């Protein structure tokens, strides 16, 4: 195995720019991609959400589509507790969409079931079930970026891993008019030889740093993992989030004060606030704080595995 190229202090200050690239978009090497075809044409992927379409395919061969439809909601069924439907979402992860639905309906998130996570920076469609939904609220539901259709009652909830596949439609945009002959030649080469299918930036979180947290986590450095998560800021952090993380670095140990800082942007720092709530009550329990955001922690471990996969694929 190659040497791990991530280089940062065990608790890297947020203003440490030693790991930054010269340009914020030069992220490839930071997520483990060091080998790309030299002849590839510059393109833009996911310039708009509808450039990347994901439609779920089920074992019965039917596919959830992104085509909007007006669907009436059937009356309640005494025998069936689960209302199944298709969820169309734009610029939201499946988890975020489920959160918004649960809040709007006034029910726990656990009552919304789905088979798999669909991309956030995309237009996607998938089946979901809602356990005993309040039909009055559901009929008047209005959430930006979310649409529901094809309602019917069922006896069982949808659980993870039930769908068969995902059908992708991807549009790549160029700066100018692409030349026809090189494009046809490239497609022919792809058909004949395949391509290096790296994990892209979405796997690594909005700060492109999930693998950073994952490495510390897998090394058993739980306190360091938590501090990195709360204060780490780099070239890919947003101009809104970065100042808050810089300020948070000066509040280490004063968890209640740090929580007040992040509370000014509750949606942006939702997981930070959850972890800090635990720390405010249990200052010496970083493992408990990480457990309170276990879903995010799982993604960090997966992201580090993806980073290592990219490095291996690049021929390291």
Image (cartoon, rainbow, N blue to C red):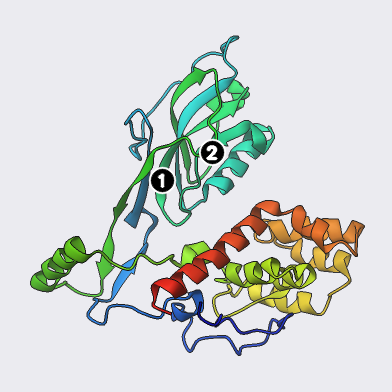
Alpha carbon of mark 2 to alpha carbon of mark 1: how far?
17 Å
Q: Is residue 71 visible?
A: yes
Side (left or right) of 80 relative to 225:
left
Side (left or right) of 151 relative to 297:
left
Q: Which residue corresponds to mark 2? A: 160
Q: Earlier in the sequence, mark 2 or mark 1?
A: 1
Measuring from the top left, give residue 244's x and y in whole percent. Answer: 71, 73
**Is residue 119 placed above or below 31 in the rendered structure?**
above
Q: Of 207 and 199, which appears nearest the observer? A: 199
Q: Which quarter of the picture shows residue 26? A: bottom left
Q: Quadrant of the C terminus?
A: bottom left
Residue drawn at the location 74% of the way across and 68% of the way down:
220
Q: Which quarter of the picture shows residue 48? A: bottom left
**Is residue 256 placed above or below 68 in the rendered structure?**
below
Q: Is residue 205 visible?
A: no
Label drawn at residue 82: none
Density class for disc 1 (Cα within 10 Å; few <14, some 14-19, many ≥20) is many
Measuring from the top left, give residue 103's x and y in whole percent. Answer: 66, 39
> Of the residues tagged 2 and 1, which is closer to the observer?
2
**Is residue 195 placed above or below 16 in the rendered structure?**
above
**Secondary element at tag 2:** loop
Density class for disc 2 (Cα within 10 Å; few <14, some 14-19, many ≥20) is few
Q: Which residue corresponds to mark 1? A: 124
Residue drawn at the location 57% of the way across and 70% of the way down:
207
Measuring from the top left, give residue 242's x and y in whole percent. Answer: 65, 75
**Callouts 2 and 1 close, C-beta under 8 Å:** no
Residue drawn at the location 75% of the way across and 65% of the way down:
262
**Secondary element at tag 1:** strand
């Amino acid at each position: 195995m190659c040497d791990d190229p991530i280089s940062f202090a065990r608790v890297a200050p947020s203003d440490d720019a030693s790991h930054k690239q010269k340009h914020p978009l030069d992220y490839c090497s930071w997520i483990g991609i060091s080998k790309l075809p030299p002849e590839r044409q510059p393109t833009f992927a996911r310039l708009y959400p509808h450039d990347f379409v994901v439609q779920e395919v089920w074992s019965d061969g039917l596919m959830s589509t992104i085509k909007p439809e007006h669907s009436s909601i059937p009356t309640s069924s005494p025998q069936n507790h689960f209302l199944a439907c298709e969820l169309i979402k734009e610029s939201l992860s499946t988890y975020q969409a489920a959160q918004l639905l649960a809040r709007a309906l006034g029910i726990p998130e656990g009552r919304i079931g789905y088979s798999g996570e669909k991309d956030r920076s995309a237009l996607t469609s998938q089946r979901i079930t809602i356990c005993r939904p309040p039909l009055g609220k559901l009929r008047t539901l209005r959430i930006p970026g979310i649409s529901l259709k094809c309602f019917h009652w069922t006896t069982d909830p949808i659980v993870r891993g039930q769908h068969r596949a995902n059908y992708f439609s991807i549009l790549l945009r160029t700066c100018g008019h692409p030349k026809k002959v090189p494009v046809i030649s490239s497609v022919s080469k792809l058909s004949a030889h395949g391509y290096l299918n790296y994990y892209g930036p979405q796997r690594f979180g909005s700060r492109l740093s999930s693998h950073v947290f994952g490495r510390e986590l897998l090394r058993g450095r739980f306190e360091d993992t938590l501090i990195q998560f709360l204060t780490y800021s780099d070239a890919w952090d947003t101009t809104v989030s970065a100042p808050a993380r810089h300020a948070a670095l000066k509040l280490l140990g004063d968890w209640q004060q740090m929580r007040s800082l992040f509370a000014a942007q509750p949606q942006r720092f939702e997981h930070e606030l959850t972890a800090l709530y635990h720390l405010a009550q249990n200052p010496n329990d970083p493992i408990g704080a990480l457990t309170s955001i276990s879903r995010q922690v799982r993604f960090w471990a997966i992201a580090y595995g993806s980073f290592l996969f990219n490095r291996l694929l690049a021929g390291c």
